[in-house]
Amino acid sequence: MKALVTGGAGFIGSNLVDKLLKDEHDVVVFDNETANTHDGYYWNDKAENRYVDLSQNYSSPNLLQTYCRDVDCIFHMAADISVQYSIEKPYESYSNNINSLFNVLEFAKRHEIGKVVFSSSASVYGVTDKVCVETDATDPLNAYALSKLNGEQIMKMYHDLYGISTVSLRYFNVYGPRQSNTGQYAPVVGIFQKQKEQNSALTIVGDGEQTRDFVHVSDIVSANMLVADKDVHGVYNVGTGIEYSVNQIANMISDTQRNVPAREGEARRSVADISKIKSIGWEPKVNLEDWVND
């Protein structure tokens, strides 16, 4: 298989690129190093790497055609993923994400690329205290979440109108190698680990009893590769179906802790129903507690 991975130098994208190359696939990587939620960028020298801004309407289709001949599958991971940026600059955040997706899908349509896999987010559900099922009502609370929900709808439209096999994966709380350890919305696992390394108290927001579904990046990678290989389309949750409280995570890492005021509008519970993706053969492999204690 020849694959294009957009956002392939970031946290999740670079892990996917490494696995694709390890499995002897040909890989083209697009990234423009503008995401302000990364602690670094990770280009694999074995891939065909291109510094490209896919949100630019005037250039993207030509660049895609130049660099991506004979591509079988596109993994579209490039996005402005900062929630804070999307709150401060909603138009820029939303338009960048939607423009880049349209450019990818237009290229796929023109060149009859069989599969496009889109990285969506559990943020489309909004604040909910129930286990999230793909058929649940959605309630995006910021421009980032809205761009993901509308992205899923655009993906469905291109499947229905043009016959492209499109899959949208709703990631829950992703952690693992190359995760960001800074910023208000960085994964709590990474933040706690960095605070411990600095001999600082772990900062627990609110009472710490809010729960999250933490899924390892290698399991996100395996989900992407599975749906790329399967004759499937539509939306799939990608989590573990297991929830841990922030207090539980903190207690795995350090006894030195402090609490700060809760963030307004933050969900008390976020956990995935993964029955749908399990039905096509995917299972999470990494246990959070084992990984933290390794």
Image (cartoon, rainbow, N blue to C red):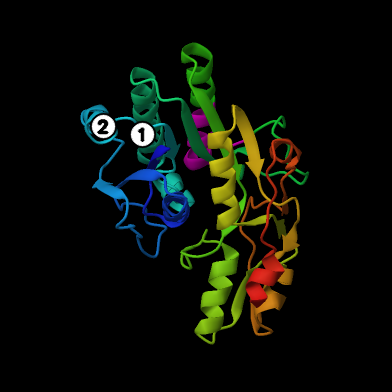
Query: Which callout, 1 or 2, points at the residue further toward the start of the chain?
Result: 2
Does residue 134 belong to the magenta stretch?
no
- Residue bounds of the magenta highlight: 139-152
Image quadrant assignment for residue 77: top left
Q: Residues within 10 Å of mark 2 (few under 14, many from 20)?
A: many
**Magenta highlight on residue 143:** yes
Can residue 152 be seen by looking at this rendering? yes
Residue closer to the observer: 45 or 144 = 45
Q: Depth check: give the residue in front, 32 or 47.
A: 47
Q: Are marks 1 and 2 in contact (CB under 8 Å)?
A: yes
Q: Position of residue 157 (x, y in %)?
A: 51, 18
Given the current orientation, which residue lies at the most extreme top position? 161
Looking at the picture, does residue 32 appear above or below residue 59? Answer: below
**Which amino acid is tagged 1?**
Ser
Residue at position x 46%, y 67% in the image: 182
Q: Where does the image place residue 233, in percent across and percent down from the top left? A: 59, 27
Residue pictured at 66% horizontal, 77% vertical: 293
Numbered label attached to residue 265: none
Q: Mark 2 belongs to which amino acid?
A: Ser
Q: Which mark is residue 100?
A: 1
